Amino acid sequence: MGPRLIVGRGEKVASPASGPSTTRIERNGFIADIITSKSGSGDLFHYVVQRQNSPEIVHWGQELSLQCAIESVNAYIEEFAVKEA
């Protein structure tokens, strides 16, 4: 099953005053949320990876671009899948 990318979970937020925008990736039994926040030097993309149906965070981090955050999440999920195989 390929990655499932859900942008904004129904609500893409354009202005920082109304809150951060969110991207969700669901793949191989994991859910990853990428949250965009504003900083003095630009956007930051924070990500949290969890197993589906579990509140436990198994991996987290931040990147300077959405593409890098997506790549980090996918790399973690791929690495974890190899360890479990």
Image (tube, helix red, strand yellow):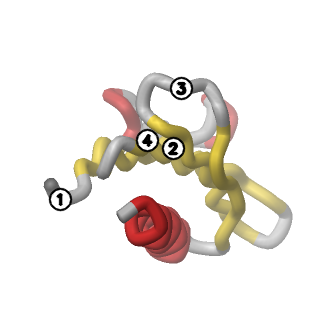
Residue at position x 68%, y 54% in the image = 60
- Which secondary structure lies at badge 4? strand
Residue 61 appearing in the image: yes
Rendering coords of residue 51 (x, y %): 48, 38
Q: Amino acid at mark 3?
A: Ser
Rendering coords of residue 73 (x, y %): 49, 63
**Mark 1 touching mark 4, by CB under 8 A?**
no
The Cα atoms of the two marked residues, 1 and 4, are separated by 13 Å
Depth check, mark 3 against mark 1: the one in front is: 3
Question: As drawn, which residue projects farthest toward the right?
Answer: 40
The Cα atoms of the two marked residues, 3 and 2, are separated by 14 Å
Q: Which residue is mark 3?
A: 54
Instruction: Give the numbered dot on residue 74.
Output: none
> Foreground residue, 75 or 22?
75
**Left or right position of 27 against 12:** left
Rendering coords of residue 74 (x, y %): 42, 67
Depth check, mark 4 against mark 2: the one in front is: 4
Q: Which residue is mark 1?
A: 2
**Left or right position of 16 against 12:** right
**Mark 4 touching mark 2, by CB under 8 A?**
yes
- Which secondary structure lies at badge 2? strand
Q: Which residue is mark 4?
A: 31
N-terminal of the pair, mark 3 or mark 1, is 1
Q: Amino acid at mark 4?
A: Ile
Quadrant position of the N terminus in the picture: bottom left
Q: Which residue is mark 2?
A: 33
Q: Is residue 13 above or below residue 46?
A: above
Residue at position x 56%, y 72% in the image = 65
